[in-house]
Amino acid sequence: MNEAHKKALADYLIALADDELILGHRDSEWTGHAPILEEDIAFANIALDEIGHARLWYELAAELVGGDKARYPDQQVFFRPAADFRCLQLVELPKGDWAFSMLRQYLFDAFEQHRLRGLVQSQHKPLADVAARIRNEELYHLRHTRAWVPRLGQGTEESHRRMQAALDELWPYAQGLGAPLPGESEALEAKLVPSSRSLFDIWSGEVTTFLSESGLKVPPAERDVVADRAVHSEYFGALIADLQQVAQLDPEAQW
Amino acid sequence: MVSHGSVRAGLKPAQTYRPTSEQLWAALAEVPDPEMPFVNLVELGIVRDLEWVGPSLRVTITPTFAACPAYEVMGDDIRRRLGQLGVSQVEVQVRHDPPWTSEWITEEARQKLKAAGLAPPPHHRGDLIQVLLDPVACPRCGSTNTSLRNSFGTTPCRMIYTCNDCKEPFEQFKPL
C-alpha cells in the first residue's frame, strides 16, 4: 500500500469509527431509562459493542498513520474538535423515543452487515480480520432489532404511530449511508474497501421490503437527503461537549 | 562513593530464571476469567501464545468479544500470577487475528459452564446463522423446550433464555 492509499484508508476508518462511537454514545443514553429491564440490558450491551468496534477501527487507523495504537483512540475521541468528526447526522440525532432508537439501530446495523461483508474481502489483511470479528458480533444486534421492528410496527396503534413517525424522520438521514466515505474512492481503487453506493442499493431493497412487511410506509427515497459528513447537526456540539468534558478537565489523569 | 560499574561490567550477568513452558501454561490455567471465575483463561481459548522477547515474556491474548470490558483485568491477573512464578517482565499483547471463536472453548470448560448453570455455546463450525436457529438445552433439566428472552445478557458474551419446563431462567454463552 502506498502512502496515499494509507492516508485514504485511515480517513475512511476514522469516519467508520466516528459513526460507531456516536451511535454507541446515543445508545448508552438508554442505560437506566429503557422501558423494560431486558431492553435496558440490550441497549447497554449494544452501546458497549459499538464503542468497542469504534476502538478497533481507530486502532487500525493509528497503524496506518504511524500513531501510538494505545493512545490514539482516546486522542480521537476526547481531544478532537467537534468539526473534525466525520460521522453521519443519522447517528447524531437525539435518542428520541424507544421506537426511534430501535429503528435507527436496525437501519444502521442492516447496512453495516453488508459493509462488513465487503470489508472481509479487503486487500488490507488486518482490516479484513477485524471486519470478520465485528461481523459475527453484529449478527446479534441485527437479530435483536429485526425482532423488534415488526413487533412495534404491527403492535398497538401507539407503537405503530411512533414507528411510522420515527421512520419518516430517519429516512432522509439514512440515505446518507449510501454516500462515499472520506478516502473511499482511493481505497476502493486499491480494493481495500467496498463501494458504499453498491451496498446501499442492496440495503435499500432489503430494508424497504422488511419495513413494508412490518406494516410501515416507506417514504419516497430522494427527498432531503442528509449525507455530508463534514456538516454536523445542531445536536452535535452538545453531544461532543458532554462526551469530552471530563477528559478535558484533566488530560493527564490516570483512570 | 566508588562506582562499581566497571566491576559489574566485567562479570557475566547471572542466568535469569526461566520457568519451563509447561510451568507457565499451568500457571496461566489457574487464572480465572474475571466474570466467570469457574473457568480459566486457557480453557476459554483466550491465551493464545507465549514467547520470550529478550528478558520479557510476551503473552498473546484474544478477547472473546471486541468490546469485552474485562480484558484489561485479565492482563493484570496474568501479570500477577506470572509474577508469583518469578517472571517479572510480562507484556500482554492483544491479537484479533484470527478472531476468537467459541469453538476454542475446551470440552472440560463446557462442562464447567454447564455445572455453573450457564448453557455452553453449541458447536457451529463457522455457520453462526444456522446454529442460532437451533434449540438450546436448559442447563438444569436438559429440556430443549426453551425460549430466548434476550440476545443480550449480563456480559457481552451471554444471552438470556427461559426454560418452559422447569420454568427457570438461564443464560447461554453466545456462540461466536
Image (cartoon, coloured by chain):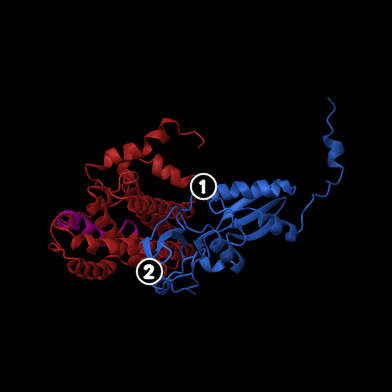
Name the foreground residue: A84 vs A249.
A249
Reading the image, the residue beneath label 2 is A117
Amino acid found under the numbered disc labelled 2 = Arg
10 Å crowding of disc 1: few (<14), some (14-19), many (20+): few
In the image, which lettered chain appears blue?
B
Q: Please name the predominant secondary structure of the magenta segment in the image.
A: helix
- At x 15%, y 54%, the residue is A158
- At x 26%, y 71%, the residue is A202
**Residue A31 shown left or right of residue B114 in the figure:** left
Q: In the drawing, what numbered circle is on residue A70?
A: 1
In the image, which lettered chain appears red?
A
Name the foreground residue: A93 vs B155.
B155
Q: Chain of mark 1?
A: A
The spot of residue A40 in percent (x, y) is 34, 50
**Residue A5 shown left or right of residue B115 in the figure:** left
Helix, strand, or loop for circle 1? loop
- Separation (CA) of disc 2 from disc 1: 27 Å
Where is A251 relative to A168, above or below?
above
| Mark 2 on the same chain as mark 1 | yes
Question: In this view of the protein, can residue A21 be seen by the observer?
Answer: yes
User: Magenta region: which residues?
Assistant: A161-183
- At x 52%, y 50%, the residue is B70
Where is A189 relative to B62, above or below?
below
**Residue A208 shown left or right of residue A110 in the figure:** left
10 Å crowding of disc 2: few (<14), some (14-19), many (20+): some
The spot of residue A90 in percent (x, y) is 25, 53
